[in-house]
């Protein structure tokens, strides 16, 4: 196997194009928490992907909705490039000169008063849990610190943990 695969320096146009060899290289150093399809994507444009052996596929997964505008959408690339050239990323610990306008437009688009942009799914889950806990306290009267005992008292014995 080429040294470039081991060192992560494989670039488009390199000689190693076998799907099996590339999958084996990835599997050798990847935690096995997910089992991808045996397809090695090399390029993509719009709704189409091309594998390392030149076969084209219609991308019906669309990055689990992350690519609804297609691979390589010129308007999205131009907008991302323009922002990346200004400021790559700021923490929410700082204010950003375009954040307020973005949130205002997003809230209007969604028909909401407030929005809370997130960078990751972990942040979204954490916020959802905090929101649910606050709702439980304010709407259902779940006492602070007593949520665990309240949950046990309100669930049926059929779903309780076995001793």
Image (cartoon, helix red, strand yellow):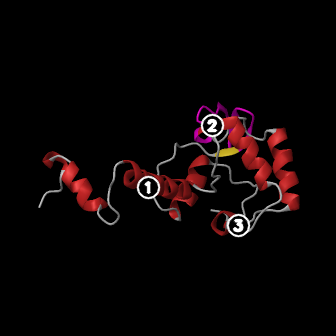
Q: Is residue 46 magenta?
A: yes
Residue 62: mark: 2
80 left or right of 43? Answer: right
Tag 3–tag 1 contact (CB < 8 Å): no
Give the extent of the magenta segment.
43-64
Q: Secondary structure at mark 3?
A: loop
Q: Which residue is at a point 52% across and 62% down the rendered structure image?
A: 30
Residue 134: mark: 1
Q: Crowding at label 1, few (<14), some or many (≥20) Cα neighbours within 10 Å?
A: some
20 left or right of 154? Answer: right
Residue 14 point in image, percent of width and height = 76, 55
Real-space CA distance between mark 3 and mark 1, rounded to the nearest whole angstrom = 25 Å
132 left or right of 93? Answer: left
Q: Residue furthest left?
A: 163
Observer able to see residue 154? yes
> How many numbered marks appear?
3
Instruction: Give the label, 3 or 2, closer to the camera.
Output: 3
Q: Quadrant of the C terminus?
A: bottom left
Q: Quadrant of the N terminus?
A: bottom right
Q: Is residue 149 magenta?
A: no
Q: Secondary structure at mark 1?
A: helix
Residue 142: mark: none
Q: Secondary structure at mark 2?
A: helix
Residue 113 placement: quadrant:
top right
**First of labels 3, 2 by sequence position:** 2
Q: Which residue is at a point 41% across and 56% down the rendered structure image?
A: 133
**First of labels 1, 2 by sequence position:** 2
Instruction: Give the label, 1 or 2, closer to the camera.
Output: 1
Residue 92 point in image, percent of width and height = 69, 64
Residue 91: mark: 3
């Amino acid at each position: 196997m080429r040294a470039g695969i081991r060192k992560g320096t494989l670039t488009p146009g390199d000689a190693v194009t076998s799907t099996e060899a590339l999958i084996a290289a990835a599997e050798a150093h990847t935690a096995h928490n997910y089992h991808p399809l045996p397809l090695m994507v090399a390029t993509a444009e719009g709704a189409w992907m091309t594998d390392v052996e030149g076969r084209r596929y219609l991308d019906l997964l669309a990055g689990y909705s992350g690519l609804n505008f297609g691979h390589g959408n010129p308007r999205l690339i131009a907008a991302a490039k323009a922002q990346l050239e200004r400021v790559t990323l700021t923490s929410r610990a700082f204010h950003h000169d375009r954040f307020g306008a973005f949130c205002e437009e997003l809230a209007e688009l969604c028909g909401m008063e407030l929005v809370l942009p997130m960078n990751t799914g972990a942040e979204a889950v954490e916020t959802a849990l905090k929101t649910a806990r606050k709702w439980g306290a304010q709407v259902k009267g779940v006492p602070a610190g007593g949520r665990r005992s309240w949950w046990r008292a309100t669930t049926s014995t059929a779903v309780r943990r076995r001793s």
